[in-house]
Image: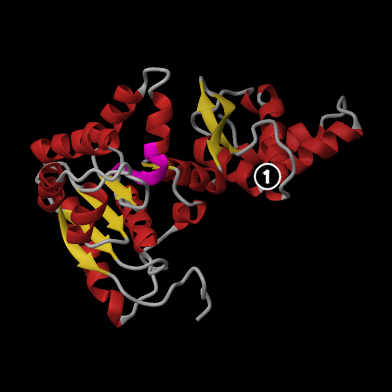
Amino acid sequence: MENVSETLKILMNKRNLNQRYQKLMADVYHDPDVRQFLAAHQDELSADALERSAAKLYEFCDEKRKVARHEPTQAPGYQPELVMSNHLIDIAYQPTPQLREEQANRELQQRVRSISMPKNIQNATLAGYERDDNRAAALMSALDFIDAYTQAPKRFHRGLYLYGSFGVGKTYLLGAMANALAAKGFQTTLIHFPSFAVEMKRAISNNTSADKVDAIKRAPILMIDDIGADSSSTWIRDDVLGVILEYRMQEELPTCFSSNFSMQELQDGYLTISKQGDEEPVKAQRIMQRVRFLATEIEMVGRNRRLNPGD
């Protein structure tokens, strides 16, 4: 096509255009992004491309200004971009950096399925994990697990069984692990086991308990938080926890736990003695064989960070 600069002069000086339109289009044609685009594509543009594409060029500049000023636009979250279409000028809308960041964050959250977990765990990070000598072993084990799983996700990796007193950061570390794995593209399910047990009892009435157990047992990575904190029942122990752990052991699926009890304490108390007072040590041992196969026991000690978060 003819020289772009000459064409712009002709368009801006046309006598039959009113002054308002001339002013609007003069601003459009002087826009640096418009001029750069026209210069880059002048050989592709048809002879009347600027006249026929005037509305598109004005839309581009107007929407670009709105985005820069954080004003409402016709395509919220998207910014305009000039493109070629059949030797004419058109507009394509691309996600803004902010929208791309929001989309990336949503994708991360979707990779972490959380059931009855504390809200602050959604934002837990390994960088935000308070490091001290008493909890260094747990952090290093978490980092080792993430590294090993990332390098070979199809191999079996033993998870972590974190135990210790209230508020030492067991749940937070599980959440931080889940979020770190999500950032690497892996899906994780976290369940607060006492709440999950209550949900399972309610699910009996509408015949959905089997579906819920099936979904949990098949999770690519499962983290069971606060196991042993509820009143045990033989049904929860055998038909819920037992079924989940049996499947995960057979399929060699990575599983992590947190508890206020050591493995032995969990076996001797929560798993052996039901809320009716019945003792079934053989069944408890059977469950614990699966826990020990799936996870390595790690003690966490320290102050209660829930009571003294600023110490």
Instruction: Give, as a three-letter code, the residue at label 1.
Output: Val
Q: Percent position (x, y) of residue 92?
A: 55, 30
- Residue 244 vs residue 37: left or right? left
2 is within the stretch colored magenta? no
Instruction: Classify 10 Å Cα crowding around label 1: few (below 14), some (14-19), many (20 and above).
Output: some
Quickly name the residue at label 1: 67
Task: Let me know if residue 191 is in the magenta part.
Answer: yes
Left/right placement of residue 166 relative to residue 64 reads left
The answer to which quarter of the image holds residue 38 is: top right
**Observer-nearest of 15 and 131:** 131
Number of numbered labels in the structure image: 1
Q: Nearer the viewer, residue 11 or 81?
A: 81
Vertical comparison of 206 with 227: above or below:
above
Q: Quadrant of residue 167?
A: bottom left
Task: Relative to 45, say whether 80 is above or below.
Answer: below
**Does 119 sit above or below residue 198?**
below
Q: Nearer the viewer, residue 176 or 289?
A: 289
Disc 1 is placed on an element classified as helix
Q: Residue at x 63, y 41 (%)?
A: 34
Identify the residue shown where x is 11% and y is 36%. Answer: 251
Span highlighted in magenta in the image = 186-197
- Relative to 23, 101 lies left or right: left
Relative image position of residue 229 (x, y in whole percent): 36, 52
